[in-house]
Image: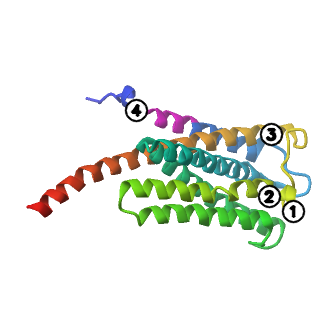
Amino acid sequence: MTQRIPWARISWEHWVAGCGLALLLVGTYVGLFVAPPERHMGDVQRIMYVHVPSAWNGLLCYTGAFVAAIVVLWTSRPKWDAAMVGMIEAGVVLNALLLVQGSIWARATWGVWWDWDVRLTTSLVMLLLFAGVMALRSFVEDAERRTTWTAIATIVSFVDVPLVYFCVRWWRSLHQVQSTPETVDRAMVLPLRMNAVAFLLLAIWFAARRARLELALRRRDEVAVPERRELVHA
């Protein structure tokens, strides 16, 4: 006898992840097999369909974490602390993917895996800053101090986010200034937008699952602390 799947019990973020994965598959197919090759780079340019969405959504996750950090300092609510952690870690994953994809693209177009270009350097610094935020958080045992320190560190680290976005406008860079739909072939815009939305949905899923885990760990710690105190007094 087969057991029916309890669809009603599936969390909303899993539905979001399913939509994101389906959209990613379609967008990637269009980008690989339907969109035309770029005039100068040829098929190498197709990595753009995952590289650019990684960059966009990584910056978006860090921005969301920045907003959550401000709300955390204002309200001290655990759900905002958990949301902040989820978005930071989603941003770190996308940031790491961004650098790996960029290195592959750079090797094919510039002939080197890495160059201390202003966009690459600020992106690396951004990854190290937010990874450092999570490292700092792991060393603080008290929940209230951990929340406050993480929020403050997130706000400080966010300073690098606008630098990453605007650096190609402010300084000379190997990277071109941000493109617009008017400067990109329409056949290239479609898979780029599809994958951008797909990465966004998958980032939401990741951040939501990580936030749930953080809340569960916080509840566990709140139960464990009184038990430790009782053992000490006994």
Instruction: Name the spot of residue 127 as percent of width and height, x first.
Output: 62, 63
The Cα atoms of the two marked residues, 3 and 4, are separated by: 33 Å
Q: For mark 3, does the 10 Å Cα neighbourhood hold few (<14), some (14 to 19), or many (20 or more) residues?
A: some
Please report the bounds of the magenta region as a residue range.
Answer: 11-19
Q: Which comes before the other along the chain, label 2 or label 3?
A: 2
Which secondary structure lies at badge 4? Answer: loop
Q: Which residue is mark 1?
A: 171
The reply to whether callout 3 and callout 1 are in contact (CB within 8 Å) is no
Which secondary structure lies at badge 2? Answer: helix
Q: Amino acid at mark 2?
A: Val
As for residue 17 lying within the magenta part, the answer is: yes
Which secondary structure lies at badge 3? Answer: helix
Front: mark 1 or 2:
1
Q: Which residue is mark 2?
A: 44
Q: Which residue is mark 4?
A: 10
Which quadrant is the N terminus positioned in?
top left
Q: Which comes before the other along the chain, label 1 or label 2?
A: 2
Q: Is residue 23 above or below residue 89?
A: above
Q: Which comes before the other along the chain, label 2 or label 4?
A: 4
Q: Which residue is mark 3?
A: 189
Q: For mark 1, does the 10 Å Cα neighbourhood hold few (<14), some (14 to 19), or many (20 or more) residues?
A: few
Q: Amino acid at mark 3?
A: Val
For residue 39, side relative to residue 197 (left or right):
right
Inspect this view and state whether residue 93 appears: no
Question: How is the rendered protein coloured?
Answer: rainbow
The Cα atoms of the two marked residues, 1 and 2, are separated by: 26 Å
Q: Residue at x 87, y 62 (%)?
A: 171
Q: Amino acid at mark 4?
A: Ile
Front: mark 4 or 1:
1
Q: Which comes before the other along the chain, label 3 or label 1?
A: 1
The reply to whether callout 2 and callout 3 are in contact (CB within 8 Å) is no
